[in-house]
Amino acid sequence: MLVLSGLAPLLGLLRRPPDPMLLIYTAFAGACLFRRRLTALVERLPGPVALHLLALFLCAGALTETLAWANNYLRAAEEPALFHPQLFADLIVGVGFYGGWAAAWWIALRRFRFKLWEAFVIAGLQGVFLEQSGAVFLRMVHAWAANPLLSLALGLYVFAVHGSAVGLAAAPLIDRFAAPEKSRSWLRFPAVVALMVGLAFAGTLVAQAAASLLGGLPPKRSIVEHPFW
């Protein structure tokens, strides 16, 4: 069932223009399918588990942002839903954003115990309600009266993207934090959401400030005419 659901996003490539965004779910499904092998591979990496967590979040984030950029580029979006229309600039800002997510989960996992499916659902729901500062949820609300199926489809789309981004990073090592003495209190859910939002915002500001010290990011221009920088 997991394999079949992971193949479903491939249908998005048949659209005109193609939509590669949900391939992040395909990657997550693959990570679940080969989870034991990935876990063993990550455990052999040098360095502390916090460094592994950061590296996995940055890799998952880079894939997420690249797919999002490709989706906007193929649609020739005039106002791309990205940190920055130019890919390399977007990835630079993404280091701060997904680095913030990594810090949030590291803090939460030191105190609380989560299962992988819980991490997926938490991230998916926070995406539905908080993506683009709540603009996606408002679009869902406005679309509900006229086309509830469209509203649900939009919500599931965003849910799958955000859940997969976190799930892909968490799959190989979340069980390494699952000590039985750690809390399973319901407070772990709002706590990790608050951490994700606050530290992603802070990380984004840090990344932008660091980029400014090194010459700054390019001005936001057409994603088609200036795709990379």
Image (spheres, rainbow, N blue to C red):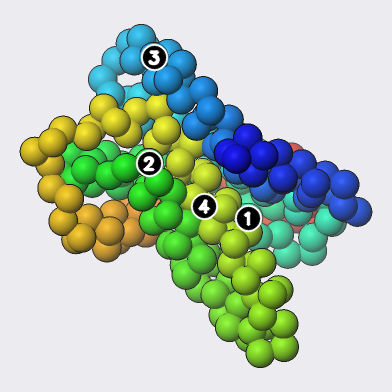
* Residue 77 locus on image (x, y percent): 79, 60
Residue under label 1: 82
Q: Are marks 4 and 2 in contact (CB under 8 Å)?
A: no
In whole angstroms, how far apart are the C-alphas of marks 4 and 2? 14 Å
* Residue 94 locus on image (x, y percent): 52, 44
Residue under label 4: 162
In whole angstroms, how far apart are the C-alphas of marks 2 and 1? 27 Å
Q: Is residue 45 left or right of residue 129?
A: left
Find residue 136 and report its image quarter. bottom right
Q: Amino acid at mark 2?
A: Leu
- The disc, 2 or 3, on the residue closer to the chain's N-terminal end is 3
**Secondary structure of the residue carrying numbered label 2:** helix
Find residue 139 and report its image quarter. bottom right
Residue under label 3: 40
User: Depth check: 183 or 59 in front?
Assistant: 183
Q: Is residue 184 above or below residue 48?
A: below
Q: Residue at x 72, y 88 (%)?
A: 146
In whole angstroms, how far apart are the C-alphas of marks 3 and 1? 34 Å
**Secondary structure of the residue carrying numbered label 1:** loop
Q: Is residue 65 left or right of residue 55?
A: right
In whole angstroms, how far apart are the C-alphas of marks 4 and 3? 25 Å
**Which label sits in the foreground, 4 or 3?**
3
Q: Residue at x 79, y 64 (%)?
A: 78
**Secondary structure of the residue carrying numbered label 3:** helix
The 10 Å Cα crowd at callout 2, few under 14, some 14 to 19, many 20 or more, is some
What numbered label is drawn on residue 116?
A: 2
Q: Is residue 72 left or right of residue 113?
A: right
